[in-house]
Image (cartoon, coloured by chain):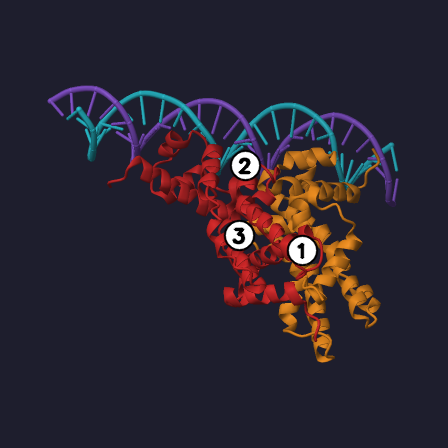
Chain colours: A red, B orange, C cyan, D purple
Amino acid sequence: MNRSPEDTRLRLLAATRTLLAAKGRRGTTTREIADQAGVNEATLFRHFGSKDALVDACVEYYCRTVELEELLASLDGDLERDLRRIASALMQRMESVRDLIVMSLAEENGNGTVGEAAWRAPTAIKKIVADYMAKRIAAGELSGNPLFLARFFMGMVFSYVMGRKRFPEEYAAEPAQVVDFQVHMFLNGARKG
Amino acid sequence: MNRSPEDTRLRLLAATRTLLAAKGRRGTTTREIADQAGVNEATLFRHFGSKDALVDACVEYYCRTVELEELLASLDGDLERDLRRIASALMQRMESVRDLIVMSLAEENGNGTVGEAAWRAPTAIKKIVADYMAKRIAAGELSGNPLFLARFFMGMVFSYVMGRKRFPEEYAAEPAQVVDFQVHMFLNGARKG
DNA sequence: GTTAAGTGCAAGTACTTACTTGCATAACGC
DNA sequence: GCGTTATGCAAGTAAGTACTTGCACTTAAC
């Protein structure tokens, strides 16, 4: 097996992520992580020192980048299209950290290391949304409190992502359709006419 | 100490609930539960046999009733008022099982005993919402798919309840105001005019 | 008053699990 | 070739934790 130390490290991080998502921090043993990564348990400790340090490194690794410049650059002023782009980006990010978010919510200290990292991208996007809302309110296109609107917008996507986790059989629709629906509801509501 | 066995049982159930909410199933020890309940650990096992049985009994106990007749009876046909009542009832129920929901989401088998019980009331309310939406669509007051609308409505409340858990400092508004805002958004959206 | 049930207490068992350690080995840089 | 580094392997340690058990005590029913 030609595995560099860096490779070993990455395999451990990946295995950690998978197992954390499935069984939580306390439900996951270092033995399992090592097995899943295909390395010896001792190697795990030689790399990371402790289980907690491994978990921290794992979360940090998978939440390290935010990179929203592309999203910001893609916004062109068309209200509906912009909101769809934002919702789509948000949905993607949230899906990718979904299980970490759940894990942090379930932990004693929900805003500890894991909680902070998992919410990093969503929080960054929330700021973008709030700013965007403020602009559109100023332009007379939307009405309400920009912060409340941003929160509502976040919540729409969040609840969808969580709903898919808990009731996957009910959520068969294409992401694009979901985004369309959510943006439509956000802008126009369900009232007829 | 004049404590009946029934009293002991209830104290244990209450302590279990508190600790489960704070530290999760695996993070909570039977020793802790007994201490918090003010009884001996041996008594805990004499009552419930095992930790898992205690957790099941606890969840079952706190999710045992649904009782939505009162809510149903209070609906009088005024669209906005009805939705506010439904949202308010839903919010209350979800708050009360919030931590159990989080716990079940974080567990390996999210739709096991805990998951089923925790979602029991919300699921029942979701059916009411879907039926209600269908009626109002038929009456020409709403437009869309009743199931999607119901899901969206549930999500609004769910994300608020979870948001309050994770970011309590941001959610200072009165529940009544929140409900008003949510129902307004649900019906009319954020678009001006 | 006697009995039975419920409980506290203290000790103990069996298992899991994070973490360590000493040694052999294989690869890689020099 | 030689040393360094990363790893596997096997054994072990220490702590935590679910769960048990035997005994003494209280309480309340009869």
Mark 1: amino acid: Ala
Mark 3 / mark 2, whichever is N-terminal: 3
Q: Residues within 10 Å of mark 3 (few under 14, many from 20)?
A: many
Residue A138 visible, this angle: yes
Query: What distance separates the C-alpha of mark 3 from that of mark 2?
Result: 17 Å
Quadrant in which the C terminus of chain B appears = bottom right
Q: Which residue is mark 1?
A: A138
* Number of marks in picture: 3
- What residue is disc 3 on? A94
Q: Position of residue B162 (x, y in %)?
A: 65, 50
Q: Are marks 3 and 2 on the same chain?
A: yes
Please identify the residue farthest to the front as the structure is shown: A139
SS of the residue at dot 1?
helix
Indicate which label's residue lies in the foreground, 1 or 2. 1
Q: Which residue corresponds to mark 2? A: A113
User: Label 1 vs label 2: CA separation?
Assistant: 37 Å
